[in-house]
Amino acid sequence: MYKILLADDEGIVIDSLKFIIEKEFPGECEFASAKTGRGVIELAETFQPDIAFMDIQMPGINGIEAMREIKQVNNHIIFVVMTAYDKFDYAKEAINLGVLDYLNKPVSKDKIVATMKRAFAQCDAHKARRSQDLMVKEKLETVVPIIENGLIQDLLFKEFFQEDIDNYKNLLSITQDFGYMAVIVMGRELVGNHMTSAVAVSIEAQKVYNQIRALIEDYVPGKVGAVMSNKIPVFVPYDYSEMDYSIRAELVEKGRALCRRLKEKNEDMSFRIGFGPVLPLKRMNESYELALGSLVQSTSHVAHADDAPAMCLYEEDYPVELENQIFDGVQRGAVAEACAAASDFYDWMTGNYPENIDNIRLKVLEFALWAEHVSYSVGGRKYEFLSRGEYIPVVSDFDNFDDMKIWFLSKVKAATEVVANRKEDQSTSVISKAIEYIEENYKKELSLDEVSRAVNVSPYYFSKLFKEEKGENFVEYLTRVRMETAKKLLSTTDMSMKEICRQIGYSDPNYFSRNFKKYTGMTPTEYAKK
């Protein structure tokens, strides 16, 4: 059903239009009419027409002004101007307003019918687009929470490649490089600094999760994760590396309001909210732990880590980010990054505290030992209790900063290389086993899943690792092995095409021929003759 608005100061014109349209399109239209510009504007707001036939010269507000007003509240309405005034200025202004047609009275029946068909088609197209948009939006309402939870899980458990985080950011339109975590903790009631009946309440929370999620989004502008035990994590992207005091105070007040609102909607449950500090995205797990720590140190329903610090506080200008870069680099086996950060940190110490060599010696020892601790933890390094007995006398004997820096950087580099080599050895070992398995089994049907299972690595990780190590994906490599074998057999034997297919794992000679030509530029027969 199409809603048609007829606007003309002559009743006979309105009646004629209605008669023609009803006769040609019976039962398809609902009509409303007005004879003044003001009446048209008011009727358009209540009637919400799909199509409007507009006269230009009407009492009061003219048709052009009326269309301009209507466009502000209904941008999708289709206008058809029908007037006795054949003026260029009117036609130009009507075109600027996007009218479908500009008709000069008198207008023939055929012209009106043709115009209506065009208007109906345009109206149908808009409705189809609108329906498609709503369907996409509905699907996004289902998919977006899954994507948001995936991002939060990766940030909290640090099981990601930077590429994965970048993809999440693009999908969720996140441009910030900083953020903070909030955590909603649920229970039956608050006793001291902990919640009772956590398990039972976590089950209840699953049933009303969508309601809780919607309330959280009203107060905390972030990405909401799934229920984890009796906790719901929230990641909030942030534009700056620190949060201003006034914004922090406002955030705590919002947290209090959210707790009250959640309690109103779920009377049998109690809620607490902890906020972590602003940190780089790769350190969101720390922000989450500190958000939880702020609640442990408090008996209130809302706490912020910056109000009750649970983390180490540093003196002003201490390069904590450099410190984090050193050990993050060691943990990832990024030798250049770890050494560059260690060098900058050492220069900061000697530049700011040149008279305090003993304190610098202590820091050098501390960082060297901690770098090795990280390499023991993630690099598969064998720990030997007596292996570092000379560190204290060596560092104590340094009487100039240059020699001590060389020793310090060598320890950071050695620890990082252990991790890097371990990862490289593991990768090389996996790919070597995979290549060996492919060489032994390419004569039969072979899949990525089968090979990844043979080397005991998940298909996703194996596929990524294979591409990084070999510079081509699994299918490309397998095809190359088969084609090179086929070339050799075609050159050195009199095997039939069918026999060669069996030798290299193809069951269909035609499929083999197509792949061979794609690979070599020639058919197998042409290649054999050559």
Image (tube, helix red, strand yellow):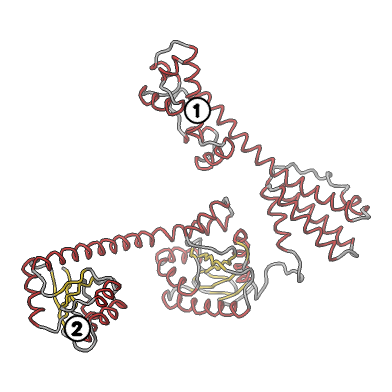
- Farthest-out residue, bottom: 60
The tally of labels here is 2
Residue 433 horizontal/vertical position (percent): 58, 30
Taking 474 as reference, is 242 left or right? right
What amino acid does circle 1 point to? Arg
Above or below: residue 278 compared with residue 407:
below
x%, y% of residue 426? 63, 38
Q: Is residue 396 left or right of residue 204?
A: right
For mark 1, does the 10 Å Cα neighbourhood hold few (<14), some (14 to 19), or many (20 or more) residues?
some
Residue 480's disc is: 1
10 Å crowding of disc 2: few (<14), some (14-19), many (20+): some
Query: Residues at badges 1 and 2 in contact (C-beta under 8 Å)?
Result: no
Alpha carbons under labels 1 and 2: distance apart: 77 Å
**Which residue shows up at 65% across the image and 41% down it?**
423
For image coordinates 17% across by 80% down, the residue present is 7
Pick the front one: 441 or 15: 15
Q: Position of residue 365 (x, y in %)?
A: 83, 55
Which disc is residue 471 wearing? none
Viewer-side residue, 356 vs 233: 356
Q: Under tag 1, what secondary structure?
A: helix
Q: Quadrant of the N terminus?
A: bottom left
Residue extending farthest to the top is 494
Q: Tell me the mark number nearer the camera, choosing from 1 and 2.
A: 2
Q: Is residue 273 above or below residue 387?
A: below
Relative to 255, is 493 above or below? above
| Residue 381: % across, % down | 73, 42
Check disc 2 and report the residue beneath it. 57
Name the kind of residue labelled 2 in the image.
Gln
Indicate the quadrant where residue 512 lies: top left
Residue ID at (16%, 83%): 34
Q: Earlier in the sequence, mark 1 or mark 2?
A: 2
